[in-house]
Amino acid sequence: MFGTLKSGSRLRRERVLIVEDDTGTRQLIAGFLKRLGYECIEAWTVASAMRLIESQAFAFVILDLELEDEEGYQLLHHSRAEQPIYIVVSSRTDVVDRLLSFELGADDYMTKPIDLRELHLRLQRSGKRSALDVGLKGELLTRELDGNLRLNMRERAIMSDNRVHCLLNRREFKALCLFLERPNKPISRDDISREISGRRHMKESRAVDVLISNIRAKLAASGSQSKIKNVRGEGYIFQSSENAAGDVANAELAGLV
């Protein structure tokens, strides 16, 4: 089983979000997976599931399509920028539902009634395949920040030596990933807004500025020397600690510091 991380702790259980409006089915799945060592959190509407995904990191999402408020498709459409593995568990047997689920980003599809042992095997298989798909062959999916700090892509956490310093919410994580993909290049507020919300302009005029301020604080709290700097008229630029050190050295050589 793949371990996950918790702020200020070592490896712990993987977190699973079970989105199912039938209480009996939801509790049956949760009870079974808890006995296997998973941490399970339950939701029964798309709205409640979205709130959980916004605030927490999950390794897996087990998703029913027929929920109280909306169809589960809405959650797939909303959440595919995240790293969880989505397994649809539905009574719908039509091939159209299966195809649509996969097109929207589901990793697997099971038709009710399900065998819980098979569900567990599919969780394990999907987790292994996810790691292989990104070329890590089972290693923890991370990206380098600076020094010994890394960004855990599954847990949305800034970590070092298997220890987590800070957890990021969904928007902070997506924005930081954007900066890591385009280091030392200005990124406009519109581009950041589009990346994290799918819209060119966020509803709150200063929402991007507040978001960047929060990321800066979490980088600093983690001991990162990397900086996110304002670029007048262009937006923001992510400068790694190595590049920042090089700039200081160049300035000293030029007699500017």
Image (spheres, rainbow, N blue to C red):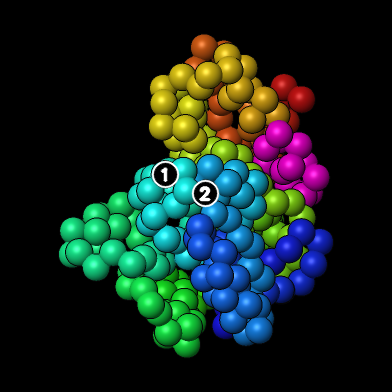
Distance between the alpha carbons at the discs numbered 2 and 1: 7 Å
Tell me what residue is drawn at x 73 percent, y 47 percent: 224
- Give the amino acid type for the residue marked by disc 2 in the picture: Thr
**Residue 224 belongs to magenta span:** yes
Residue 150 image offset from top left, x and y in percent? 63, 58
Quadrant hosting residue 27: bottom right
The mark that comes first in sequence, 2 or 1, is: 2
Residue 93 image offset from top left, x and y in percent? 24, 68
Tell me what residue is drawn at x 42 percent, y 44 percent: 70
Do residues under tags 2 and 1 come within 8 Å of each other at their CB atoms?
yes
- What's the mark number on residue 70? 1
Tell me if 71 is positioned left or right of 211 in this view.
left
For label 1, the SS is: loop
Quadrant hosting residue 78: top left
Q: State whether residue 137 is above or below residue 54.
A: below
Residue 81 image offset from top left, x and y in percent? 44, 48
- Give the amino acid type for the residue marked by disc 1 in the picture: Glu
Is the residue marked by circle 1 packed among few (<14), some (14-19), or many (20+) residues within 10 Å?
Answer: few
First to last magenta residue range: 214-226
Quadrant hosting residue 219: top right
Tell me what residue is drawn at x 47 percent, y 48 percent: 68
Do we see residue 114 in this rendering? yes
Q: Quadrant of the N terminus?
A: bottom right
